[in-house]
């Protein structure tokens, strides 16, 4: 029973994370599925997540393509009905935006730029603002800003530290790679202080 609940929650988090980024709603034989863009360098995280949570029958990874598929399921249809109209997100259900969900979304879809860490999105501007509002209520120590169909994160070190408490080592390691050199210096000071 516990494994089933964990798998259900994991699939829910993956679907919600995908709706917050760049996806396409497709149909096959009258059933909905999602085609979601993903960087080749992030696929190992998704593969580990799928294997750990036993959700391989719900997700297909295309090795040589920059996307994965969330297969038709009752859960996908339920979330699409709750969040979308005609394939576009028109509402955000805050009850789906847990710390774990948001951290997983960032781990799987964020990338580092010269000045910040960003996640690209298809959300409309009003929904981007809505997500920023709920994000700041859920994760208080990290600022999120929407700009040009991207979310930018300030105080990324705080996300990394939070991830240490909530997410698996593999995902936390991915967030570590996105820290700026200044944040890495701060992290070393924090670790040194804890050891003292």
Image: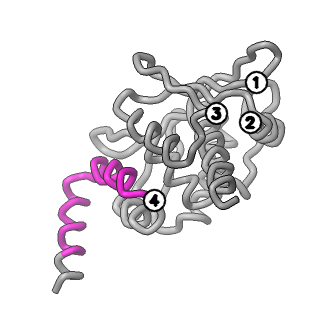
Query: What residue does disc 1 label?
Result: 32
Give how far across and how far down residue 164 sits, in percent.
39, 65
Mark 4 and mark 2: Cα distance apart in space = 23 Å
The residue carrying mark 2 is 76
Residue at horizontal 69 percent and vertical 23 percent from the top = 25
Q: Nearer the viewer, residue 167 or 91?
A: 167
In three-dimensional space, the C-alpha distance between marks 1 and 2, rounded to whole angstroms, equals 8 Å
- The image quarter in which residue 135 lies: bottom right
Answer with mark 1 or mark 2, whichever residue precedes in sequence.
1
- The one nearer the camera, 97 or 69, is 69
Q: Secondary structure at mark 3?
A: loop
Q: Which residue is mark 3?
A: 58
Q: Earlier in the sequence, mark 1 or mark 3?
A: 1
Task: Describe residue 131's horizontal placement relative to residue 195 as left or right.
Answer: right
Quarter of the picture containing the N terminus is: bottom right
Within 10 Å of disc 2 (Cα), the crowding (few <14, some 14-19, many 20+) is: many
Q: Is residue 72 above or below residue 65?
A: below
Q: Are marks 1 and 2 in contact (CB under 8 Å)?
A: yes
Q: Is residue 191 above or below residue 113?
A: below
* Residue 167: image tag: 4
Which residue is situated farthest in the front direction here? Answer: 1
Label 2 residue SS: helix
Task: Look at the image and give the residue range highlighted in magenta.
Answer: 167-191
Disc 4 crowd rating (10 Å Cα; few below 14, some 14-19, many 20+) is: some
Residue drawn at point x = 74 percent, y = 14 percent: 28
Q: Nearer the viewer, residue 69 or 90?
A: 69
Label 3 crowding class (10 Å Cα cut-off): few <14, some 14-19, many 20+?
some
Spatial distance from mark 4 to mark 3, Cα to Cα? 21 Å
Residue 90 seen in the current view: no
Q: Which residue is at a point 73% across and 35% down the rendered structure image?
A: 89
* Distance from the alpha carbon under mark 4 to that under mark 1: 29 Å
Q: Earlier in the sequence, mark 4 or mark 1?
A: 1
């Amino acid at each position: 029973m516990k494994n089933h609940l964990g798998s259900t929650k994991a699939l829910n988090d993956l679907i919600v994370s995908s709706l917050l980024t760049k996806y396409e709603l497709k149909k096959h034989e009258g059933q909905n599925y999602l085609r979601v863009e993903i960087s080749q360098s992030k696929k190992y995280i998704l593969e580990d997540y799928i294997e750990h949570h036993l959700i391989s029958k719900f997700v297909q990874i295309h090795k040589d393509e920059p996307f994965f598929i969330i297969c038709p399921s009752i859960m996908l249809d339920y979330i699409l009905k709750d969040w979308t109209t005609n394939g576009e997100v028109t509402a955000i259900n805050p009850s789906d935006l847990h710390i774990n969900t948001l951290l997983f979304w960032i781990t799987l879809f964020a990338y580092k730029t010269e000045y910040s860490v960003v996640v690209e999105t298809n959300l409309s501007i009003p929904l981007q603002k809505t997500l920023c509002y709920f994000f700041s209520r859920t994760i208080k120590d990290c600022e999120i800003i929407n700009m040009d169909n991207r979310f930018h994160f300030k105080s990324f070190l705080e996300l990394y530290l939070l991830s240490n408490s909530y997410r698996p080592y593999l995902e936390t390691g991915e967030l570590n790679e996105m820290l700026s050199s200044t944040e890495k210096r701060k992290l070393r000071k924090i670790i040194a202080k804890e050891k003292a």
